[in-house]
């Protein structure tokens, strides 16, 4: 884990020829359904980059139409802002749930509007996985966990690595048998994520986390947090199919790595075309699983 990477004498990033999973082929769409949020967290990259006073809600039907025309398996992340503030969120989720090519719906929420989230349980939309984000500037740990229990959906708590308060939260999530993911925050003008925690203290919490395979002379596995902390996300010049796309409030579908705007009805080549990476580092942890090959 984190504290052992330096002692793995046989590991050298220069020897790595392939990273990720051959079977990870589902397209990932990140749909920013709104820029509104009830919170203004100091470490929020969305808040730092783009905060609008009014969100553009009118294009959601256009987006749903475009997604209905894509005949390849996909996962979609419903994000913001705070998605529960979108007045048509239930309609959006019901439409996505009925789409045969949509395998998973990840709904990211600060769970402030608990009544709307409880409603989802009654609708039996079993493709939805709630990603419940804890924000220590606004949430009390015990109250947050009680709200989680009331929601009664498939969920994962998104734990932002900010300061030592996260250890109390992690301990209580474990005691209550609540799944969690550890989120290394992105740097931006208003916040620099804290990566100076005692790595031995973090190790026990990372043992349950998904790992990414690095193939060299031997195979090594690292969690997304380890990858960021140890700068193992430098793939400039490597080859991959960057199958992660942002859907903005205008209804455009844009590749998150290349900024290429997809045609209204994208082909397989449009979606899966391999490129040589031009980015200094792979910042999005969701991209780590996508197969990458060293390019001579």
Image (cartoon, helix red, strand yellow):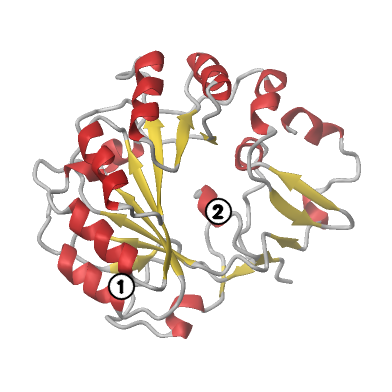
Left or right: 99 in relation to 288: left
Q: Which residue is mark 2?
A: 280
In this rendering, the answer to whether 259 lies above or below 72 is: above
Quarter in which the N terminus is drawn:
top right
Q: Distance between the Cα atoms at labels 2 and 1? A: 31 Å
Q: Indicate the position of residue 184 as horizontal and vertical percent values.
A: 52, 35
* Dot in front, 2 or 1: 1
Quadrant in the picture for residue 177: top right
In this rendering, the answer to whether 154 lies above or below 294 is: above
Q: Is residue 248 visible?
A: no
Mark toward the start of the polypeptide (2 vs 1): 1
Q: Is residue 55 visible?
A: yes
Q: How many marks?
A: 2
Left or right: 232 in relation to 186: right
Q: Are marks 2 and 1 in contact (CB under 8 Å)?
A: no
The 10 Å Cα crowd at callout 1, few under 14, some 14 to 19, many 20 or more, is many
Residue at x 46%, y 72% (from the top left corner) = 73
Residue at x 77%, y 63% (from the top left corner) = 17
Q: Indicate the position of residue 113 as horizontal and vertical percent values.
A: 22, 33
Residue at x 39%, y 54% (from the top left corner) = 126
For numbered disc 2, what is the local secondary structure?
loop
Q: Indicate the position of residue 27 as horizontal and vertical percent values.
A: 47, 68
Quadrant in the picture for residue 43: top left
Q: Which residue is mark 1?
A: 67
In this rendering, the answer to whether 37 lies above or below 210 is: above
Residue at x 37%, y 71% (from the top left corner) = 260
Quarter in which the C terminus is drawn:
bottom right
């Amino acid at each position: 884990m984190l504290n052992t990477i330096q002692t793995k004498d046989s590991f050298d990033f220069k020897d790595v020829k392939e990273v990720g999973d051959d079977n990870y082929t589902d397209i990932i769409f990140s749909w920013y359904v709104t820029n509104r949020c009830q919170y203004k967290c100091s470490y929020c990259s969305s808040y730092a980059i783009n905060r609008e006073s009014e969100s553009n809600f009118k294009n959601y039907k256009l987006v749903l139409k475009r997604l209905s025309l894509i005949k390849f398996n996909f996962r979609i992340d419903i994000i913001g802002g705070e998605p529960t503030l979108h007045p048509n969120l239930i309609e959006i989720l019901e439409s996505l749930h009925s789409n045969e090519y949509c395998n998973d719906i990840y709904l990211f929420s600060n769970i402030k509007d608990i009544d709307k989230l409880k409603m989802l349980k009654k609708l039996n939309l079993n493709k939805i996985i709630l990603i419940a984000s804890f924000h220590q500037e606004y949430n009390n740990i015990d109250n947050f966990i009680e709200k989680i229990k009331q929601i009664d959906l498939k969920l994962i708590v998104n734990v932002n690595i900010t300061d030592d308060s996260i250890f109390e939260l992690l301990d209580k999530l474990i005691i209550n048998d609540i799944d969690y993911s550890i989120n290394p925050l992105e740097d931006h003008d208003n916040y620099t994520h804290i990566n100076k925690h005692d790595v031995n203290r973090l190790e026990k919490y990372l043992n349950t986390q998904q790992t990414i395979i690095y193939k060299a002379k031997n195979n090594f596995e690292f969690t997304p947090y380890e990858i960021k902390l140890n700068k193992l996300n430098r793939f400039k010049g490597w080859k991959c199919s960057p199958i992660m796309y942002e859907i903005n409030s205008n209804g455009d579908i844009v590749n998150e790595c290349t900024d290429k705007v997809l045609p209204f009805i994208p082909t397989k080549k449009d979606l899966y075309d391999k490129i040589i990476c031009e980015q200094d580092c792979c910042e999005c942890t969701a991209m780590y699983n996508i197969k990458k090959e060293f390019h001579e």
